[in-house]
Amino acid sequence: MGSIALAIAVTAFLAKRVGLVEADVFALSLASAGAFALIALLLALIAFHRIWTLGGPGIPAALTGTFFALIALFPPALVAGMLIASPGANDITTDKFDPPEVKPQTVATEQPFLTWTTSVLEEKVWPVVSERSLSGLLGNIEPDQRASDIVPRRYRIAPGRLHVAGAKALENLNWTVVDELPPDLLDAATRLQAEGATPVLGLKFDVALRIRPDRVGALLDVRSRSRTPLRDVSTNAGQIRTVFAEIDRVLLETYGDIGRLSVEESDLEETLEPELIETPQSVVPLPGFKPYFEDEVEPEGVSPDVSDLAG
């Protein structure tokens, strides 16, 4: 029984990793593996009790079944624990009041089992977890949406150039751009949307970049949304941090050390004083030439040999 549970768990993991099954089938397979593993543990306990009280062979088989069952029980327990400990972490954005738009790209909407599981967690499990402060027992994990670094960022660069840097960053991360609003002007608002996959289970997620002109230069908002409630080692907050880090690296390689500022929500409406880039000049600069037309009629009383600046 323990070997059956382990075989189901390994097969479900490999099938999900290569994309042969959907998230719902993967979750149901893990639930079946967990059920077989619990049955194997129960049978092993019964065997140990009979051997202890009545004697006889069977200890190696009971130990082997227990070992297989514990290995098979680890993935379902890990997935269930991540679902309980990370409520609402499947959609993270730097601007929760006006998040960037994410256009649906083959989103897996047919997930009845996961949808039902998430609704049960929202109604019955997560309120109990918050009341008993289970997050404190888990190491005081701060919710991803309230993390201090998941905020909009200002860059001292034109939006068009930041758009190019963002597209290069997504390319370096091997994420596929599925939707784009390229800049028609250097200071026009733009957007990018890319599709990526988590490193272990290959779970699909969407990342949207929204770039708007700002008094400093450009304002960047990022949103990461999972297509399934399942969790992996990389979270949506981690995807946003990865995007920020890769954009900073691309800008550093291209332009050198330029300023970028994290923006708090209360600072979005503040008026910023424009910075003076060039030093003020003491005299008004004169053009190097005077534009003219060849067929222009000279005014009467003015000799064509006399310069306009003479006098």
Image: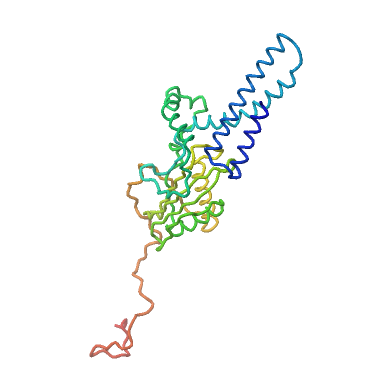
Report whether 303 appears left or right of 120.
Answer: left
- Residue at 49 percent across and 34 percent down: it is 113
The N terminus: image quadrant: top right
Q: Nearer the viewer, residue 147 or 132?
A: 132
Is residue 310 placed above or below 125 in the rendered structure?
below
Is residue 114 placed above or below 194 in the rendered structure?
above
Q: Nearer the viewer, residue 257 or 136?
A: 136
Counting every numbered tag in the picture gives 0
Q: Position of residue 23 (x, y in %)?
A: 53, 39
Report which quarter residue 293 is drawn in. bottom left
Q: Position of residue 67 (x, y in %)?
A: 68, 25
The C terminus: image quadrant: bottom left
Q: Position of residue 165 (x, y in %)?
A: 50, 56
Farthest residue to the top: give it.
Answer: 53
Is residue 156 placed above or below 125 in the rendered structure?
below
Report whether 62 appears left or right of 275.
Answer: right
Q: Position of residue 32 (x, y in %)?
A: 58, 30
Farthest residue to the right: give it.
Answer: 57
Report whether 271 appears left or right of 179.
Answer: left
Q: How is the image coloured?
A: rainbow
Report whether 290 appears left or right of 60.
Answer: left
Q: Nearer the viewer, residue 52 or 181?
A: 52
Report which quarter residue 304 is drawn in. bottom left
Report which quarter residue 70 is drawn in. top right
